Amino acid sequence: MLKNLTLPHYILIGLLAWGLPGFFVAGSQAVIAVAAASIPVWLCTLGARDESPVQTKFKFKNQRLILIVLFIYLFLDATIGRQKFADNLFFSRGAVASFIGAANENVSRGRGIAELLGAIAIFIPFTLWDFARRAHSKIKLYLYLFALIFIVYEIGISRGYLFMAVLSILLGSRLNLRSIAYSFSGTMAVFLLASYVRGDFNDISFSNPLFDAVAWPYLNLSLLLAKNPPGGTWLDFIMEFIKKFIPSFLYQKEIFSFNIEMTKLIYPRFENFVESISIFTYLGELLYYKPVLITSAIAGTLLGVLSRFAERLIKLRKLDSTRIFSGLMCVVLLRSRVQDVFSFLIFLTVFLLLWELLSNLSPRKRPPLIPDGEGFSQHG
């Protein structure tokens, strides 16, 4: 059963896992939000396992050229772009402070060109890993090496990204209880190491960094509801979604930085500079925009449609690690915001479409599985 999980299934799991405990904080409003958001996603899971898009023969003819292009991109982004090595929690003690400073500086601003490219490039290592499993031995090592370099580069200060990246790599396509147990144990070791390096053991509110990561969003949600914010409307929620399709470098749009603005609301001492950014689970956002029922139904419909479309593209190329990483990241992002998941799924779709273009697809039906002489099987 676990092997048959599709991207909409992961999102449904995230909605239920982060939403149902919200009943103890928000009561019946949480139940309404969870149900209204989950039902459309559940409908999009129906038939997703058995959906078989037209299979095509895949020839990865430009593999060396693609590696060169990826190397050039990484070099440019690391030197004049986002420069994420400088904000890596394993390489810089000031990474967290630097991230918070940048977040305060860019409140209400959209992404620049470097950030947009980076959001698309986040999927590169997992797609490389998927292809490496079926690659010729001469190129396999380079694919694995590039994948690991990209993962290290993208870590930043995010333990969530690191957790899901390592878990996705360790799992591969072996989604069974035994492999999950072994993979989760290894990933937990990496998570605790990152927590130690980041200094999270010095600032524990409950029992350990992992439990804090689960408990604090609900505590923040209770503080937010106690403040009884005026909120927005479901039209405002839709407008925030539409703005995602307007590049900031073409039009200077103003976005609503929900987590930062709500952090200022529950912690007035921060005034115009927050020292840490609070999250409220996705329920915080759905309960903010009124009426809750309409907002939640719209959110669930968009999540279902976006994830179902991306799943078709993933299944077409048999990208197991990419699916697992994307699905798990959606679960993690629902710990914070629905709008973040929208952005993630849009960037995933753009990446998959670009990868289809770069990978030189041949639109003819494939014969039975045999080596194609290009270093990859015809399941590529």
Image (cartoon, rainbow, N blue to C red):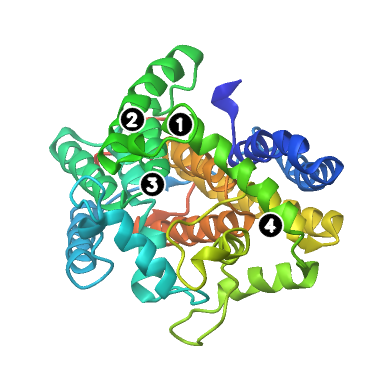
- Residue to which mark 2 is pinned: 192
Q: CA distance from mark 1 to mark 3?
A: 41 Å
Q: Earlier in the sequence, mark 3 or mark 2?
A: 3
The quadrant the C terminus occupies is top left
Q: Amino acid at mark 4?
A: Glu
Q: Residue furthest left?
A: 138
Query: In the image, what residue occupies the spot 68% across and 53% down?
Result: 284
Q: Which mark is residue 210?
A: 1
Nearest to the observer: residue 140 or residue 217: 217
Q: Amino acid at mark 3?
A: Phe
Q: Amino acid at mark 1?
A: Leu
- Residue to which mark 3 is pinned: 58
Query: In the image, what residue occupies the spot 78% across and 54% down?
Result: 296
Query: In the image, what residue occupies the spot 49% across and 79% down?
Result: 247
Q: Earlier in the sequence, mark 4 or mark 3?
A: 3
> Pointer 4 and pointer 2: residues touching (CB < 8 Å)?
no
> Pointer 1 and pointer 2: residues touching (CB < 8 Å)?
yes
Q: CA distance from mark 1 to mark 2?
A: 8 Å
Q: CA distance from mark 1 to mark 4?
A: 23 Å
Q: CA distance from mark 4 to mark 2?
A: 29 Å
Q: Is residue 112 above or below residue 139?
A: below
Pair 4/3: label in front: 4
Left/right placement of residue 274 relative to residue 238 reads: left
Q: CA distance from mark 4 to mark 3?
A: 42 Å
